Amino acid sequence: MAALLLAGCSEEMIAPGECVNALTQQEQAAGWRLLFDGSTLSQWRSYREEDVNSGWAVEQGCLTRVGMGGDLITRGQFADFELKLDWRISDSGNSGIFIRGDESASSIHHTGYEMQVLDNIGHSDAKDPSHRAGAYYDMIAPDHDTSAPVGDWNHVHIIAHGSHVEFWLNDRKTVSFEQGSDAWRTLYLNSKFAGRPAYGSLFKGHIGLQDHWDKVWFRNIRVREF
């Protein structure tokens, strides 16, 4: 059964020309820069490794999770910034986007926090509203489902400026919070991260893409620092 499922996942592909990674003239003028050019992974590395391992690759111009390899992180670290990217998830798939994480523990989710990437229709994790696409994972649930279905692209905009953080999915805000505030700490103490003392403590760190065992594609990853 497991072999059949893996075989089915491996057949899901992106069409040529679907993954465009380019800045508009307006974005260039505003100070945006690409974190992925569609052909190399020079700005990324695998978590706690020097380079990108075989779990991640470029597929038809997309940054793609292709096998077991652990999370992927940027070589650089970011404090106050905007991040934009597009993701497409496989059927019943799960992944995530981390910000402000480091490598002090066994995985980035011990410090960085996650915007959830999920097939809200096919994945059982969607039973928990704080685990649905666009959520601040296990902390804040969106009050609406703005995710696109499997096979379509989802557009992300993350803003992190000082303690203020916003998650946007497909042009609608899904989450807003103040990192480290009393309200945030209450959420933290009632979450699965309560036993991780460094969680959410950093105001500068790596951007990460999650290996949650399912195929996922990312394109047009760009960042602008304040």
Image: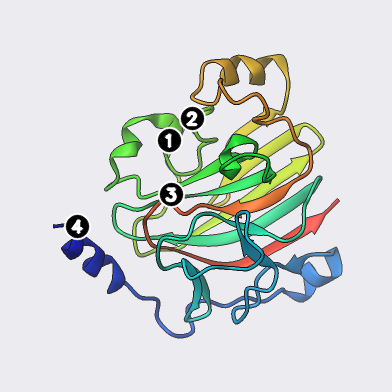
Query: What label sits on residue 2 in the rendered view?
Result: 4
Disc with the residue nearer the chain's start (2 vs 4) = 4
Q: Residues within 10 Å of mark 3 (few under 14, many from 20)?
A: many
The answer to whether the residue labelled 2 contacts the one labelled 1, judged by CB atoms less than 8 Å apart, is: yes
Residue at 25% across / 64% down in the picture?
Answer: 6
Label 1 to label 4: alpha-carbon separation: 24 Å
**Of helix, strand and loop, which one carries label 4?**
helix
Label 3 to label 2: alpha-carbon separation: 17 Å
Callout 2, which amino acid?
A: Asp
The answer to whether residue 151 is left or right of residue 218 is: left
Label 2 to label 4: alpha-carbon separation: 28 Å
Callout 4, which amino acid?
A: Ala
Image height of 121 relative to 188, above or below: below
The answer to whether residue 95 is left or right of residue 195 is: left
The answer to whether residue 43 is left or right of residue 5 is: right
Disc with the residue nearer the chain's start (2 vs 1) = 1
Disc with the residue nearer the chain's start (1 vs 4) = 4
Label 4 to label 3: alpha-carbon separation: 27 Å
Image quadrant where residue 67 sits: bottom left
Callout 3, which amino acid?
A: Ser
Disc with the residue nearer the chain's start (4 vs 3) = 4
Query: Residue tagged by mark 2?
Result: 138
Query: Residue tagged by mark 1?
Result: 131
Residue at 50% across / 37% down in the picture?
Answer: 135
Q: What residue occupies the far left of the structure in this picture?
A: 1
Query: What label sits on residue 147 in the rendered view?
Result: 3
Label 2 to label 1: alpha-carbon separation: 6 Å
Label 3 to label 1: alpha-carbon separation: 13 Å
Disc with the residue nearer the chain's start (3 vs 1) = 1
